[in-house]
Amino acid sequence: MPYPTQAQLLSTGATTLTLTPSFPQPGREFKVRIDAYSYDMTRSRILWSIDGAVKSEYEGEREISLPAPALGVPLSVAVSVTEPSGGVHTAKKTIVPSALDVVVESDTRVPSFYKGRALPSPGSRVRLVAMPSLFSSNGTPAGAGNLLYTWRINKQVAKSGIGQRALATTMPNSGSLLVEVTAETTDGSARHTSATEIAATSPHNLFYEDNPLYGLSHNALPKDFTLLEDEITVRAEPYFVSPDIFRNARHEWTIGNAPVQNPNADPQTLTLRKTGETGSAEVGFSIRNLSSLLQAAAGTFTVHFEN
């Protein structure tokens, strides 16, 4: 059936575009579907336009797939539906991909020379900070402090409000922490949700040579090594423990699982000396807060003695 040359523009409310997902991510494929509420599209002519250019390859399609543009770059998707009677229905959507990162800050302790970040451990405090990149329909960045944030911990709402970018919480004594945060503009035009599972790292000790001439080595001793000099002073460094562990701490060195009296003034160091005998020994160190069973770290290494 031919289409009339004079088209009548009807209300756009009869035609809507639905995005899947509702807020596409940068570079990811998304779908756009036409929904008609007051007329039959079966014999209608459907034309799609992308950024103002008609795309003939999509003609007649009720649903199309498109790649989302880069972060903050607007993409305009429009559709025109012409009925056999000449009535024209239009709808338009502008997509501006967004992003939302979550920074995890832990209060656990690491050595001052350690280049990595402190990781959360069971029972430790963590601070979560949302880093959103949301945009208006014209690509203008939305101010992070003006967004509405909703935080969920293990699927339960923990905090919400405008400008609430940060959340402080405690790691569980066992298992991981599931965190979800949604940032959206107050008018709902842009929204992004980010979910992350935070795993707890077990506190542990690493061991370093503390040389009277060269100072503390920043390279950890291997788990198994041979003592070549007459003696070595070893320093234990706890990783990923609460700083509170040192307030009421118990330090214990063991050799062959038997506690040893440590004459060193620094309880985190132990001096091992050759005795003229050949053999091996497992050396261990543990530190724990006597007020909290969760605040503890342990570690061992094996040293071989040769004549």
Image: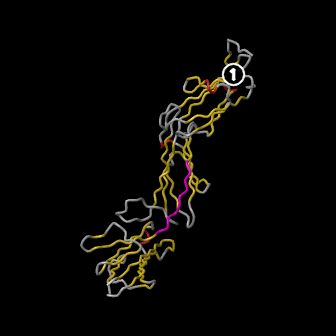
Image position of 85 with respect to 202: above or below: above
Q: Amino acid at mark 1?
A: Arg
Q: Residue at x 60, y 57 (%)?
A: 154
Q: Is residue 67 left or right of residue 263?
A: right
Quarter-wise, where is residue 19 in the image? top right
Q: Is residue 203 left or right of residue 156?
A: left
Q: Is residue 90 left or right of residue 214?
A: right
Quadrant where the C terminus sits is bottom left
Residue 201 inside the magenta-drawn segment: yes
Magenta segment range? 194-203
Where does the image place residue 36, in percent across and percent down from the top left?
Answer: 71, 28
Looking at the image, which is closer to me, 109 or 146? 109
**Element on which disc 1 rests:** strand
Q: Residue at x 48, y 75 (%)?
A: 291
Quarter-wise, where is residue 233 in the image? bottom left
Residue 262 inside the magenta-drawn segment: no
Q: Which residue bears the numbered disc 1? A: 45
Quadrant where the N terminus sits is top right
Image position of 5 with respect to 251: above or below: above
Q: Residue at x 46, y 61 (%)?
A: 119
Image position of 11 with respect to 254: above or below: above
Where does the image place residue 161, in percent across and percent down from the top left?
Answer: 55, 47
